[in-house]
């Protein structure tokens, strides 16, 4: 048989052997194996935990493993605004806080549908994960807020249609907020055609507007541009313009920051999601409130390789049992016209 005679990789052979295994089951199992397991009980982790602010941490989308482990320390108002904590809210519906945070940051469309009558529509208009709901409820749209939503630009574009003379034809054209639109990184194509309407204070924070900023250097707010990850190539060309206090939180600039530790603002640097390795070497300079906001917070904790190995071992045993089950091998040998004994040698 060609598959067995050629030098196929282990992965290719597994794909062959798993040809009749439900891909959904396999995907679910493989996804669970990719989840890291952390050591929270070691001395290093205990020292970190003593400094973290759980009121702030509860809203951190990168802190889910910590929040799951220490659910008793969670601030439920903050957690209600954590876009990646929907599963925790669903397990504790009586603790959900229906403030503006939930409407602005929740990422689960089914969850938002379930509680649609308790949502704040003005803030929902800023939520990129709620675009479908906004399409279905146009009368509830707050266009000024919507202008900042990167996933809802298609709902703004009809308001900007013009006639042959360049006059706006939509009756709600006046609701387009060019300040918010200048901040919208999904609206670059609109901004490029309306440079006379740009607000450069907000544009300086727009991660997809580097080319527009480069054309108008004198209008840039260099404080805001210094923390804009999308403006890093521009900042490299104008290092003298960098405001280091603000630049300290720019993750794209971590290489330059690492070479200039003396210029850092450690409070802002504690927000930088590429800075954890450096922060671990300078724990005395860490701002713990901002580290609690840092989406790379889990890098502060060592991985539990022993536990991960044990978890994977259990799956490996199950995988081998399924793959090399005699019934499966016999079926494959018949289907692919190969010897049963050849399959055992893969």
Image (cartoon, rainbow, N blue to C red):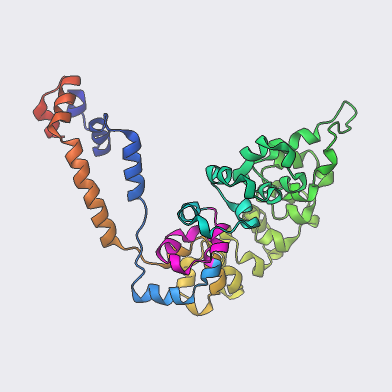
Q: Residue at x 85, y 34 (%)?
A: 171
Residue 59 pos. (x, y %): 55, 61
Q: Nearer the viewer, residue 171 or 166?
A: 171
Please tell me whether residue 59 belongs to the stretch shown in magenta: yes
Residue lying furthest left: 341
User: Which quarter of the rendering shows the N terminus?
Assistant: top left
Residue 298 falls in image quadrant: bottom left
Position of 138 relative to 271 (above/below): above
Residue displayed at 56% across by 72% down: 289
Residue 149 or residue 54, whichever sits in front: 54
* Dominant secondary structure of the residues highlighted in magenta in the image: helix
> Is residue 243 shown left or right of residue 172?
left
Residue 334: x, y in percent? 16, 20
Residue 334 vs 76, above or below: the answer is: above
Residue 171 within the magenta-colored segment of the rendering: no
Q: Residue at x 80, y 56 (%)?
A: 218
Q: How many marks?
A: 0
Which residue in the rendered view is the most extreme toward the bottom? 284
- Which image quarter is the C terminus in? top left
In the image, residue 126 sits, relative to residue 75, either above or below, namely: above
Q: Position of residue 232 (x, y in %)?
A: 63, 55
Residue 58, how many percent across, how many down? 52, 64
Left/right of residue 125 with respect to residue 161 in the rendered view: left
The region drawn magenta spans: 57-83
- Of residue 313 and residue 12, the one placed in the foreground of this image is 313
State whether residue 52 is above or below residue 119. below
Task: Look at the image and tell me whether residue 291 can be seen.
Answer: no
Image point (75%, 54%), residue name: 202
- In the shown orientation, is residue 11 left or right of residue 345? right
């Amino acid at each position: 048989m060609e598959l067995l005679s050629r030098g196929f990789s282990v992965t290719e052979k597994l794909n062959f052997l798993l040809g009749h295994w439900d891909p959904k089951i396999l995907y679910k199992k493989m996804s669970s194996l990719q989840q890291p397991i952390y050591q929270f009980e070691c001395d290093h982790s205990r020292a970190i935990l003593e400094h973290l602010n759980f009121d702030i941490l509860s809203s951190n989308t990168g802190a889910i493993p910590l929040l799951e482990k220490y659910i008793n320390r969670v601030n439920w108002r903050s957690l209600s605004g954590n876009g990646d904590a929907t599963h925790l809210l669903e397990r504790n519906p009586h603790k959900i806080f229906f403030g503006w945070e939930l409407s602005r940051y929740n990422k689960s469309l089914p969850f938002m549908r379930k509680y649609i009558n308790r949502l704040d529509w003005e803030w929902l208009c800023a939520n990129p994960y709620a675009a479908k709901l906004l399409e279905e409820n146009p009368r509830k749209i707050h266009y000024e807020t919507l202008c900042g939503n990167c996933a809802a630009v298609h709902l703004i574009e009809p308001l900007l249609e013009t006639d042959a003379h360049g006059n706006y034809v939509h009756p709600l054209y006046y609701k387009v907020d060019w300040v918010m639109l200048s901040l919208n990184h999904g609206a670059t194509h609109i901004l490029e055609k309306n440079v006379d309407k740009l607000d450069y204070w907000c544009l300086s924070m727009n991660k997809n507007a580097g080319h527009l900023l480069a054309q108008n250097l004198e209008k840039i707010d260099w404080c805001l541009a210094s923390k804009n990850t999308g403006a890093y190539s521009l900042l490299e060309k104008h290092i003298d313009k960098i405001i280091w206090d603000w630049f300290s939180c720019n993750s794209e600039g971590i290489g330059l920051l690492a070479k200039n530790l003396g210029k850092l603002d450690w409070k802002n640097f504690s927000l930088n999601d590429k800075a954890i390795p450096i922060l671990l070497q300078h724990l005395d300079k860490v701002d713990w409130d901002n580290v609690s906001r840092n989406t790379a917070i889990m890098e502060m904790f060592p991985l539990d390789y022993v536990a991960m190995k044990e978890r994977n071992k259990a799956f490996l045993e199950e995988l081998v049992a399924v793959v090399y089950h005699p019934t499966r091998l016999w079926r494959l040998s018949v289907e692919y016209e190969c010897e049963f004994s050849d399959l055992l040698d893969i």
